[in-house]
Image (cartoon, helix red, strand yellow):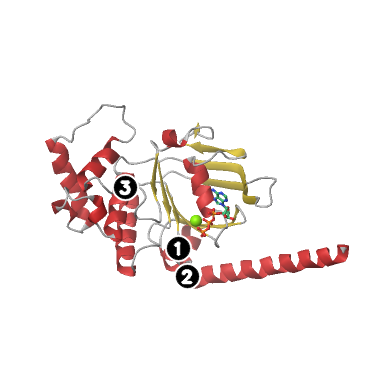
Amino acid sequence: MAKLEVRGVYKTFFPGTPDEVRALRGLDLTIEPGTFVVVIGTNGSGKSTTLNAVAGTFRVDSGSILLAGQDITDWAEHRRAKLIGRVFQDPLAGTSPGLSIAENLALAARRGLPRGLGRAVPRRGVVDLRERVKPLGMGLEDRLDNPIGSLSGGQRQALTLLMATLRRPELLLLDEHTAALDPRSAEQVIRLTEDVVRKQHLTTMMVTHSMAHAASLGDRLVMVHQGRVIFDVTGAAKQRLRPHDLLEKFEELRRSDQLDETAAQLLREAYV
Ligand SMILES: Nc1ncnc2c1ncn2[C@@H]1O[C@H](COP(=O)(O)OP(=O)(O)OP(=O)(O)O)[C@@H](O)[C@H]1O
Ligand SMILES: [Mg+2]
């Protein structure tokens, strides 16, 4: 668990072309160690881009990113991956479908270790894996030799979450990791998420479109809009939040965006 600092980050995709998108526009966000932050915002507001900027999927145009006091702005993605655990929306991402559960977990356990260390899965390792998988409550401990490809989406996401947190990352990034699951599996994976984040005191950012989850989970809620943080609540105010309050916040945004649009339209008309 480490402190994350995102300072004045800008990112424009396809700059200077008709497809230009100003995805991040001076994003500032400091997350204290061990804090569980829920991230919400409309489609295209910059939530995934924020997580990708932190994970190093692309270079940002300006601004800086610090993790555990180190400036990681210029670090390659694979170097950051040693410190950061990630789970995506797609249950197919993050695991190797042809490999067994045990092999996938063994790979995750070695993440960030020097090459050649612990290449084979030692017997003790197998016992450990059983014990790690059992608390998922899905009976996967008896299927360690089965290929990951044979599991349901929910089982896969539970395993991906386990893999992402096996070596206690400094930062955990979850991008709508339950959005593709049926309601029951989604709840299961959410419970596992809460459990692992609490037990390991992980600094966590979780993107969700579920207002129920956004209201009930985490220590802090951040709303991203047009590539910036526009709403940020923590402590007692966060605990008091209800899904209804968040829906109202979205409605407020929609109204102010409409006003912006009307103003822009008036300006356009004034100049023709
Ligand atoms: N790799 C990319 N190349 C070009 N444009 C991108 C890329 N990634 C994101 N964008 C654009 O940047 C903007 C922000 O996208 P982002 O994926 O961060 O939104 P989001 O808040 O995660 O939305 P959603 O809720 O739909 O997942 C969008 O207009 C999107 O089309
Ligand atoms: Mg997204």
Of residue 215 and residue 256, the one placed in the foreground of this image is 256
The residues bearing labels 1 and 3 have C-alpha atoms spaced at a distance of 26 Å
Label 3's element? loop
Q: Is residue 204 left or right of residue 267?
A: left
- Which residue, given by chain and number where applicable, does mark 2 sit on? 243
Q: Is residue 209 left or right of residue 201?
A: right
Q: Earlier in the sequence, mark 1 or mark 3?
A: 3
Q: Is residue 147 left or right of residue 31?
A: left
Q: The residue under label 3 is which amino acid type?
A: Thr
Q: Earlier in the sequence, mark 2 or mark 3?
A: 3
Residue 223 badge? none
Of residue 249 and residue 44, the one placed in the foreground of this image is 44
Q: The residue under label 2 is which amino acid type?
A: Pro
* Picture quarter with the C terminus: bottom right
The residues bearing labels 2 and 3 have C-alpha atoms spaced at a distance of 33 Å
Q: Give me the residue at 33% from left, 52% from top.
A: 198
Q: Residues within 10 Å of mark 1 (few under 14, many from 20)?
A: many
Q: Answer whether labels 1 and 3 touch (C-beta < 8 Å).
A: no
Q: Give me the residue at 15% from left, 41% from top.
A: 126
- Which residue, given by chain and number where applicable, does mark 3 sit on? 95
- Which residue, given by chain and number where applicable, does mark 1 sit on? 214
Rendering coords of residue 74 (x, y %): 53, 32
Q: Answer whether labels 2 and 3 touch (C-beta < 8 Å).
A: no
Q: Answer whether labels 1 and 2 touch (C-beta < 8 Å).
A: yes
The residues bearing labels 1 and 2 have C-alpha atoms spaced at a distance of 7 Å
Rendering coords of residue 73 (x, y %): 54, 35
